[in-house]
Image: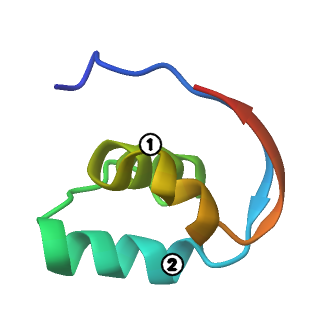
């Protein structure tokens, strides 16, 4: 559902490439951009609040 979430994000997710690969492999996630913010959205969509423990970096966001 492309209109389900809105994300305001500042910072950097250091492990976003690994997260994107895992989300694509395990859940079939498809990404429209190369950015790390999209990894936050997909992680929350598939893992819920547990996604927060998987994010590594310096960042702040509101979802």
Q: Residue furthest left?
A: 28
Q: Secondary structure at mark 2?
A: helix
Residue 56 image position (x, y, % from top left): 72, 72
Among the 4 quarters of the image, the one containing residue 52: bottom right
Q: Residue furthest right?
A: 58
- What label does residue 41 carry, if any? 1
Give percent across and percent down for residue 36: 59, 58
Left or right position of 50 against 24: right
On the question of residue 35 being in view, the answer is no
The way the protein has been coloured in the rendering is rainbow
Residue at the image point whose x is 21% and y is 57% from the top:
30
Local crowd at mark 2 within 10 Å, few (<14), some, or many (≥20)?
Answer: some
Which image quarter holds the C terminus? Answer: top right
Q: What numbered label is drawn on residue 14?
A: none
The residue that disc 2 covers is 17
Measuring 17% from the left and 76% from the top, which residue is drawn there? 26
Q: Residue 39 placed where, x, y %? A: 47, 56
The residue lying at 48 percent from left, 57 percent from top is 50
Residue 7 visible? The answer is yes
Marks 2 and 1 in Cβ contact (< 8 Å): no
Along the viewing direction, whichever of 61 and 12 lies nearer the viewer: 61
Q: Residue at x 61, y 65 (%)?
A: 53
Name the quadrant of the N terminus: top left
Looking at the image, residue 18 lies above or below residue 3: below
Q: Earlier in the sequence, mark 2 or mark 1?
A: 2
Q: Is residue 14 left or right of residue 24?
A: right
In the rendered structure, the answer to whether residue 12 lies left or right of residue 1 reads right
Residue closest to the far front: 50
């Amino acid at each position: 559902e492309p209109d389900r979430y809105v994300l305001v994000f500042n910072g950097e997710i250091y492990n976003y490439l690994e997260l994107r690969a895992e989300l694509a492999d395990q859940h079939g996630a498809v990404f429209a951009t190369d950015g790390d913010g999209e990894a936050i959205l997909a992680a929350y969509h598939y893992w819920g609040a547990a996604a927060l423990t998987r994010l590594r970096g310096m960042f702040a966001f509101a979802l």
